[in-house]
């Protein structure tokens, strides 16, 4: 038996922040990062709360990667204030921190139901609708994935005004993260009809609107579409999982601090080639690997097709690389110019072990060996 469940009510479109005037809560703890406060973006959240006469307090100590000491400070703030709702405002780290803070605080003192409303300020992680959060023990260099339905937000508000000021490089990286979530969940070994429908729509939107949002951040139609695509892709991978693009990107992030979306964008074309085996497919082989059909479906969604399935998957690889070039995302680690070759090649063995052990690897459509992963990391240096 399979189950598909959507636990989060999603408010989207113009003026969706007005929802904050109607929420059935009175005492709200807003959890966010210092940038949201300094940039005054926070006023867009507090104004409707004030108009509706809600009480609120602010915890704005969230930093990237949700380190456990900041989560502990947030738990102390939560227990002292005793809110009936948490409003999480920010990127993946703010939303993941909020999920963990509510979860841990209620384990210490469960004084009743506390709502969680997630308001993303980037179009990337999909964390507003997933049952995952990643917290980071920085002293031990360990990232702990938390997975529980109780982490899922009750409501998500997708208002593109909050992403209007996102700079082009971040729009590119987070947009390619959305595309990777959708593509990996579409070809995942755990895909199903519901996850596939959500992923296809997210991919169609990326195909039309990602470049537009990158080229003109004030194109609010494109911004809103990408904000919705991020959420659709989040709903898809929440049930179908991801694959080795993410497993390998996690290591590039942990060891060399390559931004998450950028690492995915750089790895994705290589992983499509590996999963479909298109470089080694010979005309005498009648059977394709299962991922070939799935990738070629996606190529069609993007308006790409060629005279056979293998060539169609090749078109998809070319499209991914075209997007990288158009949005100034390096194709290779060497092109980034920030990682010395010795350090990179010395790290490959350990990164390959960690990528194989990563929880995303289990759903990859083709089972990789360590050598396969090492080959992809090696190729990524300069291809
Ligand atoms: Fe991601």
Image: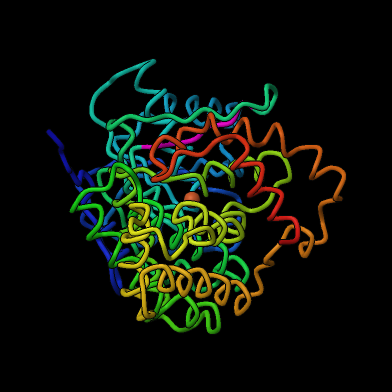
Q: Is residue 50 visible?
A: no
Q: Residue pushed farthest top?
A: 108
The location of residue 292, given as percent across then percent down, is 37, 59
Nearest the viewer among 309 and 130 is 309
Which quadrant would the N terminus be assigned to in this image?
top left
Q: Is residue 204 left or right of residue 368?
A: left
In this figure, what is the number of numbered marks? 0
Q: Is residue 238 visible?
A: yes
Nearest the viewer among 37 and 160 is 160
Task: Find out whether residue 247 is within the magenta segment.
Answer: no
Residue depicted at 46% across the width and 43% down the height: 31
Residue depicted at 42% across the width and 56% down the height: 120
Q: Residue pushed farthest front?
A: 284
Q: Is residue 154 left or right of residue 310?
A: left
Q: Is residue 300 left or right of residue 72?
A: left
The location of residue 300, given as percent across then percent down, is 32, 75
Which quadrant would the C terminus be assigned to in this image?
bottom right
Task: Find out whether residue 136 is within the magenta segment.
Answer: yes
Q: Is residue 196 left or right of residue 362?
A: left
The location of residue 268, given as percent across then percent down, is 53, 58
The location of residue 14, given as percent across then percent down, is 30, 74
Which colour style is shown?
Answer: rainbow
Q: Residue pushed farthest left?
A: 1
Residue range in magenta is 132-137
User: Main structural element of the magenta stretch: helix, strand or loop?
Assistant: strand
Residue depicted at 42% across the width and 75% down the height: 223
Asked if 116 appears above or below 222 in the picture, the reply is above
Residue depicted at 74% across the width and 57% down the height: 333
């Amino acid at each position: 038996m399979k189950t598909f469940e959507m636990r989060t009510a999603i408010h989207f479109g113009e003026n969706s922040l007005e929802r904050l005037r109607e929420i059935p809560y009175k005492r709200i703890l807003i959890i966010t990062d210092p940038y949201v406060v300094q940039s005054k973006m926070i006023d867009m959240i507090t104004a409707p709360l004030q108009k509706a006469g809600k009480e609120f307090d602010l915890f704005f100590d969230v930093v990237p990667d949700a380190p456990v000491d900041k989560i502990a400070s947030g738990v102390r703030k939560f227990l002292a204030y005793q809110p009936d709702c948490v409003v999480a405002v920010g990127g993946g780290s703010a939303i993941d921190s909020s999920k963990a803070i509510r979860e841990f605080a209620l384990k210490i003192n469960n004084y009743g139901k506390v709502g969680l409303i997630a308001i993303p300020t980037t179009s990337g992680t999909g964390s507003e609708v997933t049952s995952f959060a990643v917290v980071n023990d920085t002293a031990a260099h360990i990232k702990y994935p938390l997975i529980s339905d109780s982490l899922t937000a009750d409501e998500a508000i997708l208002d593109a005004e909050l992403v209007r000021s996102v700079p082009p490089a971040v729009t590119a990286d987070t947009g390619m993260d959305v595309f990777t979530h959708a593509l990996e969940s579409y070809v995942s070994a755990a895909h199903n009809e519901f996850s596939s429908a959500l992923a296809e729509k997210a991919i169609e939107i990326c195909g039309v609107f990602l470049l537009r949002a990158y080229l003109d951040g004030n194109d609010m139609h494109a911004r809103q579409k990408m904000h919705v695509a991020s959420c659709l892709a989040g709903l898809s991978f929440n049930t179908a999982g991801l694959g080795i693009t993410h497993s390998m990107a996690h290591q590039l992030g942990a060891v060399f601090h390559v931004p998450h979306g950028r690492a995915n964008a750089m790895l994705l074309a290589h992983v499509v080639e590996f999963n479909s085996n298109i470089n080694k497919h010979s005309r005498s082989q009648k059977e394709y690997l299962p991922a070939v059909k799935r990738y070629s479906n996606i190529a069609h969604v993007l308006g790409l097709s060629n005279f056979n399935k293998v060539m169609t998957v090749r078109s998809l690889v070319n499209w991914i690389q075209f997007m990288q070039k158009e949005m100034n995302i390096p194709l290779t680690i060497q092109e980034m110019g920030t990682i010395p070759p010795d350090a990179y090649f010395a790290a490959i063995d350990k990164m390959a072990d960690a990528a194989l052990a990563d929880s995303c690897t289990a759903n990859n459509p083709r089972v990789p060996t360590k050598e396969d992963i090492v080959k992809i990391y090696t190729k990524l240096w300069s291809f």
